[in-house]
Image: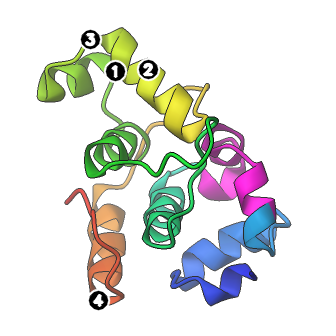
Amino acid sequence: MHVTELDLSPAALVCLKAADIYLVDQLLEHGSGDLIQHPKFSKGLELYEIICELHRHGLTFSRYGQHVQTEREREIFGLRTVTGLTLDEIGERFNLSRGRIHQLLRLHFRLDVVPPPRKHADRLHQVCASTRSSSVAGCIC
């Protein structure tokens, strides 16, 4: 399947093209930790959108088989990569330890690195508005 067949925003497609990813199989070979280090994905917004769209198709970045992330796991990912919360802050929201948050991110999203901090809060609202109109569920706004 070609990535253009996914219901992604033009910004997300530009990021995938910049990373030389044209097929969904190529995308799934990467971990979100690999992608978030790419300059085009550094804000986390487009990567979060891609994860939500993959979920809609029953696909995942998980290291272990076809575990499709739960809504809570996707929210944790969004809070970390898009909102820029620390592991401790996320842990407080979900009554989980810092270590467990790190483990969930590592296991289900292959996120082994610290994502760059999110800098523009208004950009988040733009992406959320566009994902709502394109029926991608799970926005963290």
Q: Predominant secondary structure in magenta?
A: helix
Where does label 3 land, which residue? 97
Dot 2 corresponds to which residue? 102
Other-residue count near label 1 (Cα within 10 Å), few / some / many at <14 / 14–19 / ≥20 = many
Residue at screen point 72% across, 41% down: 34
Q: Can residue 115 be seen in this view?
A: no
Which element is circle 4 on?
Answer: helix
Q: Nearer the viewer, mark 3 or mark 4?
A: 3
Viewer-proximal residue among 117 and 132: 132
Magenta span of residues: 26-41
* Residue at the spot 57% in from the left edge and 33% down from the top edge: 111
Residue under pointer 4: 133
Q: In this view, does 63 lie above or below 13?
A: above
Q: Is mark 3 on a helix, strand or loop?
A: loop
31 is within the stretch colored magenta: yes
Q: Which amino acid, mark 1?
A: Leu
Q: In this view, does 17 lie above or below 62?
A: below
Labels 1 and 2: the sequence-earlier one = 1
Rendered-image quadrant of the N terminus: bottom right
Of callouts 3 and 1, the N-terminal one? 1
Do the residues under discs 1 and 2 have CB atoms within 8 angstroms?
Answer: yes
